[in-house]
Image (cartoon, helix red, strand yellow):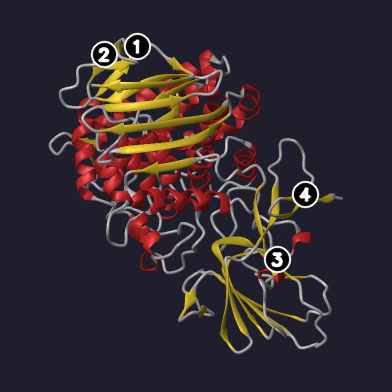
Amino acid sequence: MRKWFLSAMVFGVVLRPATGKDAASIHLVEQAPVAISKIAPGVFLVDFGRVATGNLLLTPANVTTSDAVTIRFGEALKDGRVDTHPPGSVRYAEVKISPKGTQTVIAAPPLDPRNTKAPAVLTPAPWGVLMPFRWVEVEGWPTELHADQIRRRAAFDSTWVDDAATFHSSDPMLDKVWDLCHYSIKATTFAGVFVDGDRERLAYEADAYLTQLSYYAGDADPRISRATFDRLMKFPTWPSEWAPQMVFMANADWMQTGDTAWLAAHYEGLKTKLLDERVGPDGLVMSSPDLIKHGDIVDWPGHERDGYVFTSVNTVVNAFHLRALEEMSELAEALGKKHEAAKFLEQERTAQATFQGKLFDPARGLYRDGVGTDHASLHANLFPLAFGLVPAARRPQIARWLAGRGMVGSVYAAQYLLEGLFANGEDAAALALITAPGDRSWRHMVESGATITWEAWDQKYKPNQDWNHAWGAAPANLLPHFVLGAQPLTAGWSRALIQPHPGTLTNVEGRMPTPRGELSVGWKRDKNFTLTLSLPAGMSAKVELPALEGSSGVWAGGAPMKAHREGQWWTLEEYLSGTVTIEER
């Protein structure tokens, strides 16, 4: 039997399961409302400020009546009241309680058969039913309702520290986007594994990998990522491109932790995620009519595919396969399996040559959707660019083309689109897409009042979408990795790469947690580019600064540093450590 214990916290009480050292630990945190207003006789509207998944604690003040009190939980408001008929999978629930005396009672929503029974990821039964909500209506409360009488019990990952990561820039909207996305990762840890939202509470490989990237930008602890990985090994899902993302997850874990013991224990299972059973004589992955119809996904929902033409050799599926082979080679090398590393690399190189020969159209300088079609969608080009499959000489043209097309894919594909743009000289375009006007950007979510990212850009693009979907939170990892410019260069962060991509910004500062401690970066661009870097003990950094027009080198404390120009970057020839300020001029 699982044991439970209570521990006091400064801001409330935490109830959490006692778990093994390798298991993710989720706790319930009591939260006070930010506002309570009386909106009708006997009806109070309670605002907790942001959506979180939980239920309520209510403490009456010596109630002598037995009349029932109605509690309405909601993610959305309509005309100043909790929306009782919200769109799609936006959450609403109602329950009646009968408080007595001064006894504290738990008010929990009714069971929802969509997400409180297997195969959904279940939360601990002693906690009661949980659901995401920001607002609560309390009708029939016998007295005035005060803040100390109502608390939300919200479920979060217990290792998360709110201010372990920060991001501040010269663009206030970009800062709001980061805050939305960063909080979204915290708020969607309620199940102890990365799930696809509250509608189903299921783990999917694509959701898990994208969430893992953003989670590591806010919390260095690997346990919830590993718990998700283990669940997906037991309960895999069906899309063709989802399986290779298990290799991506393992590689991200390796780069984050440098833990060869965990990697070795999962290495053999990763081999089953390479789509090898579908590889044809030329090295490319083949798709049967049934897989074309039910397996190859490209993007989701389907109308976000930019008119993608499906054929028996799918460019996107093969891009995932090639990237997974390259990462498997790296993982095999990390485990000292040199023969297998060479085999994976040779398989990737053979397939890569066929990929370029059959799928690239030299007349247009673009990749086709597949063999047998001339259609060149956004997706057939963004994934090869993001995965480093495009030969270096072709990358600028494809990056410019993608930037010109705009955000014609989903919030899922946006992670990879923006990676490709940031990494290939289109950082200004990437930032513009994040904060673009219209209804296909994170600015739209912010201006719509979202406090957790959505499953899709807008309700009209996915009418059944939920409003608590971590795969929509890509800027939580993109902004630290590319705008702050901090990424692991070697496994376990013994060496970092600091390479800011400023776009149109004039200054940025922030910090992020790593397994070795806090890393902070600040930079300012005017006529010169100044960077201040603080690294934890045991970490050194390769630093590359964006080459400003007319710049001649890099200085520290008035003395020139050894640096050389590589394309658009000034690269320092010596690794830095500790706290240092350098200036390009």
Quarter of the view holding residue 144: bottom right
Q: Nearer the viewer, mark 1 or mark 3?
A: 1
Task: State the residue in front, 440 or 511.
Answer: 511
Task: Tell me the CA gap for discs 3 and 2.
Answer: 59 Å
Residue 56 at what x, y percent from top left? Answer: 69, 68
**The disc label shown at residue 17, or none:** 4
Q: Is residue 374 visible?
A: no
**Along the polypeptide, which appears first: circle 1 or circle 4?**
4
Q: Earlier in the sequence, mark 1 or mark 3?
A: 3
Label 3 Cα crowd, 10 Å radius (few <14 / some 14-19 / many 20+): some
Q: SS at mark 1?
A: loop
Which residue type carries mark 2?
A: His
Task: Identify the amino acid type marked 4.
Answer: Pro
Specify which label sits upstream in the sequence, 2 or 1: 2
Q: Residue at x 52, y 19 (%)?
A: 539
Front disc: 2 or 4: 2
For label 2, the residue is 564
Expressed as whole percent of the image width and height from the top left, the position of residue 312 reads: 34, 44
Q: Amino acid at mark 3?
A: Val
Q: Residues within 10 Å of mark 2 (few under 14, many from 20)?
A: some
Task: Please give the residue where the numbered disc 3 appears in the rendered image.
Answer: 129
* Residue at the far front in the pictured view: 558
What is the x, y in percent for residue 165?
51, 40
